[in-house]
Amino acid sequence: MSIIEANNIHRKFGEGTLVTHVLKGIDFTAEQGEFVAIMGKSGAGKSTLMYQLSALDEPTEGTLLIDGTDVLNLNESEKTSFRLNTLGYIFQNYALVPDLTAEENVMLPLLMRGGAWNDAKERARHSLDNVDLDGKYSNLPAELSGGEQQRVAVARALTGKPKIIFADEPTANLDSVSGRQVIDLLEHLHRDYGQTIVMVTHEREYAMGCDRIIHMEDGIVTKVEQLK
């Protein structure tokens, strides 16, 4: 069953003679429980496609169904609620709030959904434990290594039990050991819990645990590589 169905996705930036056509009619599907990697050189349109698929940006043209919802027909309030309740995000720059502790950063999406403080705190600690950060609940981001900050971001993405996790270059700012730890964690979530994941990466070795690799070049899909 397809949990993401995107058809004829175009994304243009600018106006008139200054228009840049970044995505040029892309079709994309992901099945429930699938781990899909998107690969390509810098400027291929990987992250732009991710932003369309994850409802963080809106395509210039095309259709997009996520878990059966036509997200392009939602108003901004509905779209915000949909993202908060259905999707999880992991960014290459971690996107943690610097003045909040690890625990508070993970609690934040739950509180934004209207959750009770004590329940959010319990769930946040459970998520941090699952990424081997027990004992780091009270640390600020600046007191954590890059790998630890990214694991906080993974815990935050997971704590709301999203149907899909979108990971945009999650290892880009990490050393090889920390990067491998984050990829191992994502593979574990996919393998043992059936988590649907769409990940942008430059590194082929990090994509080898995926079900498929979508190769992009100059705003189009050039090849779909089936690994499993």
Image (cartoon, helix red, strand yellow):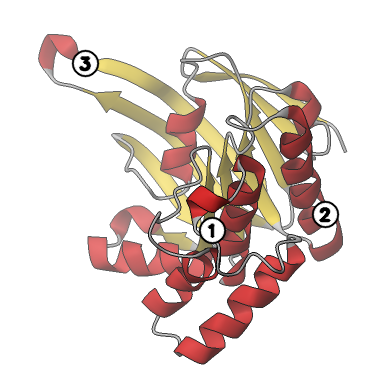
Helix, strand or loop at label 3? It is loop
User: Could you tell me which residue is drawn at 47 percent across and 54 percent down?
Assistant: 65
> Would you identify the image quadrant in which residue 215 lies?
top right
Q: CA distance from mark 3 to mark 1?
A: 31 Å
User: Could you tell me which residue is drawn at 39 percent across and 84 percent down?
Assistant: 114
Relative horizontal placement of residue 135, taking residue 156 as reference (left or right): right
Q: Nearer the viewer, mark 2 or mark 3?
A: 2
Q: Which residue is mark 1?
A: 88
Residue lying farthest top? 17
- Closer to the camera in the image, 138 or 147: 138
Residue 181 appears in the figure: yes
Query: Where is 118 relative to 196, above or below?
Result: below
Q: Position of residue 132 (x, y in %)?
A: 76, 61
Q: Position of residue 187 (x, y in %)?
A: 80, 48
User: Could you tell me which residue is drawn at 78 percent across and 61 percent down?
Assistant: 194
Find residue 19 and name its label: 3
> Would you identify the image quadrant in which residue 21 lies?
top left
Residue 161 appears in the figure: no
Pointer 1: residues within 10 angstroms few (<14), some, or many (20+)? Answer: many
The type of residue carrying mark 2 is His
Helix, strand or loop at label 1? It is strand
Find residue 188 and name its label: 2
Q: Are marks 1 and 2 in contact (CB under 8 Å)?
A: no
Helix, strand or loop at label 2? It is helix
Mark earlier in primary sequence (1, 2):
1
If the image is split into quadrants, where does the N terminus sit? bottom right
Q: CA distance from mark 2 to mark 3?
A: 42 Å
